[in-house]
Amino acid sequence: MKLSIVYHSESGNTEKAAKIMANTIHQMDGIDVKAMNINNIDENFINESAAVIFGSPTYCGTCSWQMKKFLDTSRTINLNEKLGGVFITENFIGGGADFAEITLMGCLLVRGMMVYSGGVKQVPTHFGAVLIKDGDEYQISKAKIFAQKFAKRSLELFN
């Protein structure tokens, strides 16, 4: 099963989080994972993926306009009936992470995706993973747990 991680990153923090999640998922059996910046995507890989995680930095209390534009205009990418998840990076607590994740989730739902939040067992992620700047040890562990839970759910649904 293929799983894509699609992100937008300006400072490198969101890219680092995407790579941490990709490395975590890569260690699991039965999943071919690829992390890619919206400026350099592999459309075929995304279209063949059963699940896609989207990541963005926060700007003005929401996701980046670049990620929103990507989701609004990338019509050659089929997201319908795939499992979708989100993660956010922000510069400080109170930077709008929850709203940014909900904005992304709304885009995924409109594109026909099933949205997975990660739930509240073990370490709660409610909407998805959040890392402040490049994340401290606790935030990174939450991102890894989110990635593992997302990948496990993807296998349960599509394998």
Image: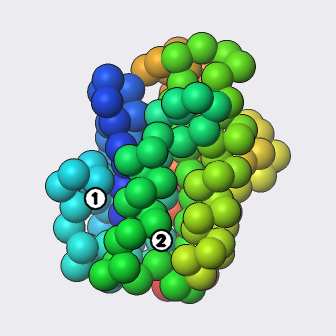
56 vs 132, left or right, is left
The amino acid sitting under disc 2 is Ala
Which quadrant of the figure has residue 31?
bottom left
Q: Callout 2: 10 Å neighbours few (<14), some, many (20+)?
A: many
Tell me what residue is drawn at x 64 percent, y 23 percent.
Answer: 95
In this rendered view, identify the residue nearer to me: 13 or 111: 111
- Compared to residue 130, the image places residue 2 above or below, namely below
Which quadrant of the figure has residue 61?
top right
In this rendered view, identify the residue nearer to me: 7 or 153: 7
Estimate the x, y position of residue 14 in percent, counting from the top left: 40, 34
- Whether label 2 touches label 1, CB < 8 Å: no
44 vs 69, left or right, is left
Say if residue 77 shows up in the picture: yes
User: Tag on residue 83?
Assistant: none
Q: Name the residue under label 2.
A: 51
- Compared to residue 95, the image places residue 149 above or below, namely below
In this rendered view, identify the residue nearer to me: 27 or 72: 72
